[in-house]
Image (tube, grey):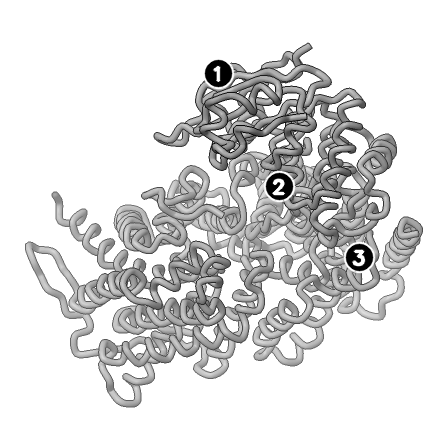
Amino acid sequence: MDTVLAQAIINGLLLGGVYAAYSAGFSLIFGVMGVVNLAHGELIMLGAFTSYWLFAYFNLDPYLSAPVAMGLLFLFGYVVQKYIINRVIGQPHIMSYILTFGLHLMVANIAIKMWTQDFRSITTSYSGANAAIWGLNIPYARLVTFIVALFVTWGLWFFLMRTETGRAIRATAQDKEVARLMGVDIRNIYAITFGLGAAITGLSGSVMSPFVIISPEMGLEYTIIAFCVVVLGGMGYMPGALVGGLVLGVAQSLAATYLNAGVSVAITFIILFVMLIIRPRGLLGKGSVA
Amino acid sequence: MTSLECKKVSMKFGALAAVQMVSFSLNSGEILGMIGPNGAGKTTLFNCVIGVYRPTSGKIYVNGIDVTGMKPHKVCRIGLAKTSQIMEPFTGMTVFENVLVGALHGGRMKMGPASYKTEQVIELVGLNEYAYKLSGSIPVPVRRRLELARAIATGANILLLDENMAGLNPHEIDEALEILKKIRDSGKSLIVVEHIMRVVMGISDRIIVLNYGSKIAEGLPEEVVNNEAVIKAYLGEKLSSLKVA
Amino acid sequence: MNYRIDRIILILFLMFTGAVAFVPYLVQSEYQLRVVTVVVLWVGIAGCWNMMSGYTGYIDFGPVVYFGIGSYVVAIAMTKYSVPFFPSLFLSGCISAFVAFLVGIPTLRLRGAYFAIATFAFAEAMKQITLEFDRTFNVSFFQGSDGITLPISNYENSFFFYCILPVTFLVVFTHYFIEHSKFGYALKAIKEAESAAEISGVNTTANKLVAYVMSAFFLGLFGAIEAYWITYITPSDVFNVQKTVQMVIMTLLGGMGTFLGPVVGATFLTLISETLGAQFVEYYLIMIGAIIIVAILIMPSGIIGGLKIRKKLRFI
């Protein structure tokens, strides 16, 4: 295999792992509540900014500030769901799209007001450092983030499968009326679910911060990628986010290597459109269809 | 004359055969009862007949026309309408408009004649006092009648009534039975799926019995009720002594 | 009784449109004329979205694609093939409608969030394709991010006002037609319960497709007129997702699936953005976000929708 191809695939996999981590939260929120969260990218932005400010003021390593981002975003998600989004659950789906779009506008523009539109980045001692194996470059930061991302996706899966709260969440996703009858506090479960989705998304934003450009307007692009990943993997099917993320990461990386970056965006959307039409349940066929 | 004929209809979902080689026919002006325990395949069979599912094998003829695999709206226009077990009124519309949709599209009528037809149907099923209420705000028994009215308004000569009397009290059932007889007398053929034995036994000219997706018996109500296989599968030991008047 | 109110509303609407037609003679400045034109334009554009998504409940998140196609068709026809404006305009509508027909067949089978995402993806894909096409295939057709400059017209603003007004009038009148026709009942039935509509004899596929294609046709016209008015287009402008968002929000504020909803919503929001937007540029988007959230929480049926429920009106 030639080096350029191998490098493109490795870059794609590293990218895809991160896509998977932040899309898992999107998939969780959709799977449980049927809410397409158009403010998803803002959660990533907030996570990245948490790490940025902790780095700027306390020189705290982004990987160490990740738990802080996770905690803050959980609170943020919990409150938003409990006091805002819960009020439109059960109404036509469009209400939730529009509501979260309103949130997207507010959060992004308040962030611009507070932090200006400047592009920022975090420069650590290991920024730009590569491991060179068989003539291939593997940036350390991306590798660590990739591993964290896989761990997070697995952790979410484990949480849903093995804990009491996780079971309550899955029960609610399957049939909220029955779950209610079994004594599950639906509104609270919804708030926890959104909080959880926000927490892992914020964490992903935080661990991505060493190598992405951070700006208040970064969110929308990530929301769109999360869409695409989740559709590839199957909406609401959690392990699908991993498959979708890796497939999309590699596809984009190959397009960017052999064509150009603009075409790679076009390909993202074409894949998304075609997938929805021919396999709306995702590559594995395990997603839910509304 | 035969209005509806199913020939060896089967429907499989993966390995599960929900309906297996079911054949039956419905004569015009007849009321055919269909019974069977929960999960016997009644609703699946109905969905094949109206075109929601395409049967895995077999043929379905409505008024002599092969409708196998046709879309529901076409089957409806050829002459077969169904009321759903799960009631689905168009909640943002009035009762009148709900029925009007059936007349306009199922009956392929223009606005004027469709309104006239709608008024007649509403009169027939006794929905007059509710005609201008939003269909989302009316009680369940009225919704059942609305489903029926919408199906009649399509002008279909065959009606499939999937548990149209579930949840009604005895008095309401009597009213509903009167309406069904009126509909039959107006020249339509009906298939009635019900769990309430009094209804099926009292109104059906003929009954077919499904169990595990297959037809296990067919005949006059009194024959069916005395049939060994049926008693075993469905009615249970206690009802074996049931006498039908 | 409601039918009489309905007639009155139609007459009022016709009189109002007639009155609006005299605006170019009444305004004191070109700025005022521009504002009125923009309001009329957005009433029409929001109406296009309402025609499809408001009545059928299929949430289209990519209507801007037909606006963009309209803009590009008129630009390419006029610059590359020297076709005069009005034939190009007509061509824009037709090509938009044709693309909508091809795209509608597969996408209208999808429901709920899937339809919304598919339309969104299609619109973004088209934007990227117009951006990258020339560079990838080494030609000069869409002219990528450089955009296309249309022939400069000698027309006054009032010319564009009189181009837009009839199209908007047609869009609103189509709503009136939808409210009173067999076609309209089909759309509403699809919105309320699609499978029930189907077994009641409604040809759901055909009716959805007609609504989708109609909406695309009008959007194509608006895209073409705006392109000629502004004289310079780029993919990022004409396929801007912000336009979709505006259509959705205007309709939602006014009331989805109502005859006057887009009229009220678009007028309200355009005037707000012209006044508040000009004075508080920095806070404008934050305020829009807040308005959306508050509107959804306290009046989910919109201004007209709420009125309709409270006053038990049928057709407004």
Disc ID at residue A207: none
Secondary structure at badge 3 equals helix
Instruction: Name the residue type under label 1.
Output: Lys
**Residue B202 horizontal side relative to residue B236, left or right:** right
Q: Chain under label 1?
A: B
Q: What is the CA distance from the residue labelled 2 to the residue labelled 3?
A: 44 Å
Q: Nearer the viewer, residue A232 or C63?
A: A232
Asked if residue C89 can be seen in this view, the reply is no
Disc ID at residue C158: 3
Instruction: Name the residue type under label 3.
Output: Ser
Q: What is the CA distance from the residue labelled 1 to the residue labelled 2?
A: 30 Å
Q: Which quarter of the figure has residue C32?
A: bottom right
Instruction: Name the residue type under label 2.
Output: Glu
Q: What is the CA distance from the residue labelled 3 to the residue labelled 1?
A: 70 Å
**Which residue occupies 75% across, 38% down?**
B174
Between disc 2 and disc 3, the foreground one is 2
Q: Which quarter of the figure has residue C17?
A: bottom right
**Which residue occupies 64% across, 46% down?**
B167
Pointers 3 and 1 within a single chain:
no
**Which residue occupies 58% across, 57% down?**
A94
Secondary structure at badge 1 equals strand
Which residue is situated farthest in the left direction here?
A134
Between disc 1 and disc 2, the foreground one is 1
Q: Chain under label 3?
A: C
Considering the image in quadrants, where does the C terminus of chain C appear?
Answer: bottom right
**Residue bearing the label numbered 1:** B8
Secondary structure at badge 2 equals helix
Which residue is situated farthest in the bottom direction here?
A58
Residue A247 location (% of width, % of height): 29, 49
**Residue bearing the label numbered 2:** C194
Q: Nearer the viewer, residue A227 or C140?
A: A227
